[in-house]
Image (spheres, rainbow, N blue to C red):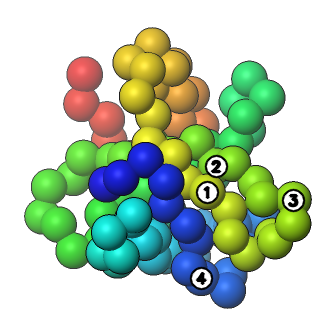
């Protein structure tokens, strides 16, 4: 994935529910990748999406910081986390929030 990804989906993540939400992100090269959104939440003043690549067999999540575009609510930017400390902290929060929904390996 490139640094900047745009939400290409009419569905608002503010309406996230447990039924399953899918998004398609387009990287800087125009490649589309679909993800299942596992959780979307605010942590330490920033919004994050924890997603699972839809067509991959590995069950490794990807964490994006969601940067909102004030001019166009349908084109939020999804930026992959690069800072390992932030990634670990956000994943720990995800695990706390979803302890009853997933079996996490330590």
Q: Which residue is mark 1?
A: 77
**In whole angstroms, how far apart are the C-alphas of marks 2 and 1?**
6 Å
User: Which element carries disc 1, helix, strand or loop?
Assistant: strand
Q: Does the residue at mark 1 contact the one at mark 3 (Cβ under 8 Å)?
A: no
Callout count: 4
13 vs 91, left or right, is right
The residue under the point 67% across, 86% down is 10
User: Which element carries disc 4, helix, strand or loop?
Assistant: loop
Query: Which label's residue is closer to the chain start, 1 or 3?
Result: 3
- Closer to the observer: label 2 or label 1? 1
**In whole angstroms, how far apart are the C-alphas of marks 1 and 3?**
11 Å
Q: Which residue is mark 3?
A: 70
Q: Which residue is mark 4?
A: 9
* Residue 92 in view of the camera: no
Query: Which label's residue is closer to the chain start, 2 or 1?
Result: 2
Q: Is residue 69 above or below residue 12?
A: above
């Amino acid at each position: 994935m490139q640094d900047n990804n745009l939400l290409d989906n009419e569905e608002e993540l503010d309406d996230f529910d447990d039924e399953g939400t899918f998004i398609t992100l387009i990287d800087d090269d125009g490649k589309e990748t679909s993800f299942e959104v596992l959780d979307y939440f605010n942590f330490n003043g920033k919004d994050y999406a924890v997603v699972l690549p839809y067509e991959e067999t590995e069950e490794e999540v990807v964490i994006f910081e969601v940067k909102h575009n004030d001019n166009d609510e349908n084109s939020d930017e999804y930026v992959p986390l690069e800072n390992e400390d932030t990634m670990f902290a956000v994943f720990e929060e995800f695990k706390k929030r979803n302890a009853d929904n997933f079996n996490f390996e330590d």
